[in-house]
Amino acid sequence: QESVELRLKEEFSPTYLEVINESHGQLEDESHFKVVIVSDGFQDKRLVQRHRLVNASLMKEGQLPFHALTITAKTNEEWDSNNSVPQSPACMGGH
């Protein structure tokens, strides 16, 4: 979890960042994460572009180092007008 937070802070300089370990079982499993990130680096970027940027910043050797990632990525203006965060979808299997 700490490495996820560090990478996102370095890449996006967010004004708000929350990384939640939603892993099943032990917290040490670290296989499912929820990221809520607010940065003006997302200005003029569509939702899919924002998700790709977040994914790319976390990848190791071309893949995410965990099973699942839920992303809410907003600009400061969007966050100020609506700071709601959708619930993560249920895991369909895997790790």
Image (spheres, rainbow, N blue to C red):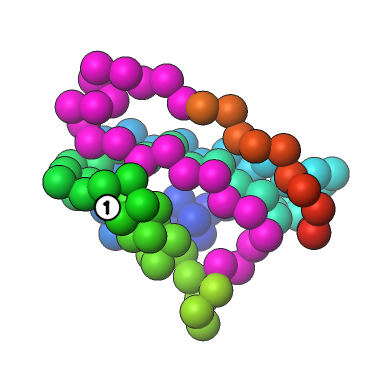
Q: Residue furthest bottom?
A: 61
Residue 83 image point, x, y percent: 36, 21
Residue 28 image point, x, y percent: 75, 52
Q: Which residue shows up at 40% across the image and 67% down it?
A: 56
* Mark 1 lies on residue: 12
Identify the magenta region: 64-85
Q: Which residue shows up at 55% across the image and 74% down it?
A: 63
The C terminus - image quarter: bottom right
Q: Is residue 7 visible?
A: no
Q: Is residue 92 magenta?
A: no
Callout 1, which amino acid? Phe
**Disc 1 packing (10 Å; few <14; some 14–19; many ≥20):** some
Tag 1's secondary structure?
A: helix
Residue 64 image point, x, y percent: 56, 67
In the rendered view, does 69 fall on the left or right side of 9?
A: right
In the rendered view, does 67 fall on the left or right side of 2?
A: right
In the rendered view, does 39 fall on the left or right side of 61?
A: left
Q: Is residue 72 magenta?
A: yes
Q: Is residue 66 visible?
A: yes
Query: For residue 52, what is the image quadrant?
Result: bottom left
Residue 43 image point, x, y percent: 16, 44
